[in-house]
Image (spheres, rainbow, N blue to C red):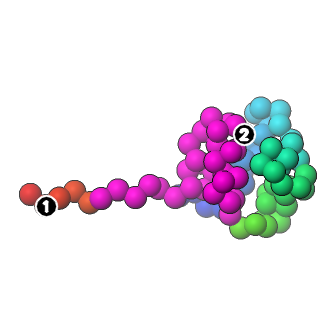
Amino acid sequence: MPSPDEVRATLVALAEDRGDSLSSLSRLIGRNAAYLHQFVTRGTPARLDEADRLVLAKHFRVDERRLGAREPWTPAEAAE
């Protein structure tokens, strides 16, 4: 799982690549215009909410793990 700083840097890079502002992305996820700016610059919130992260991942067409989702759980291989 990427560190919080890596998630913030990824979000900024994805936004810049698409020409999106953090305020427009905040509105996309139904938050106030300063929400993602505060996430990036102040670290508040510490992590993106699961629903917000999903919307952003779909918007950018990237794996949610790039935005801080944990690795999916998988069962251990059965002993042979």
Reading the image, the residue beneath label 2 is 14
Name the side, left or right, on which 78 lies relative to 48: left
Residue 72 horizontal/vertical position (percent): 44, 55
Which of 12 and 30 lies nearest the eye of the viewer? 30
Residue at the extreme top: 18
Residue 47 is left or right of residue 25, and the answer is left
Q: State the SS at label 2.
A: helix
Spatial CA distance of label 2 from label 1 is 42 Å
Residue 2 is situated, as x and y percent measured from the top left of the image, at 58, 57
Q: Is residue 66 above or below residue 19?
A: below
Residue 4 in sight from this viewpoint: yes
Q: Say which residue label 1 marks.
A: 79
For label 1, count other residues whose C-alpha is less than 10 Å away and answer few (under 14), some (14-19) or many (20+).
Answer: few
Q: Is residue 72 above or below residue 45?
A: above
Image coordinates of residue 16 in percent, x first then y, are 80, 37
Q: Say which amino acid is labelled 1.
A: Ala
Q: Is disc 2 surrounded by few (<14), some (14 to 19) or many (20+) residues within 10 Å? A: some
- The residue drawn where x is 56% and y is 42% is 63
Work out whether residue 56 or residue 7 is closer to the camera in this orientation and state it.
Answer: 56
State the residue at coordinates (63%, 57%): 50
Q: Is residue 32 magenta?
A: no
Q: Amino acid at mark 2?
A: Leu
In the picture, the disc for residue 8 is: none
Residue 67 within the magenta-colored segment of the rendering: yes
Give percent across and percent down for residue 65.
55, 50
Write the start and end of the magenta stretch as one range.
Answer: 47-75
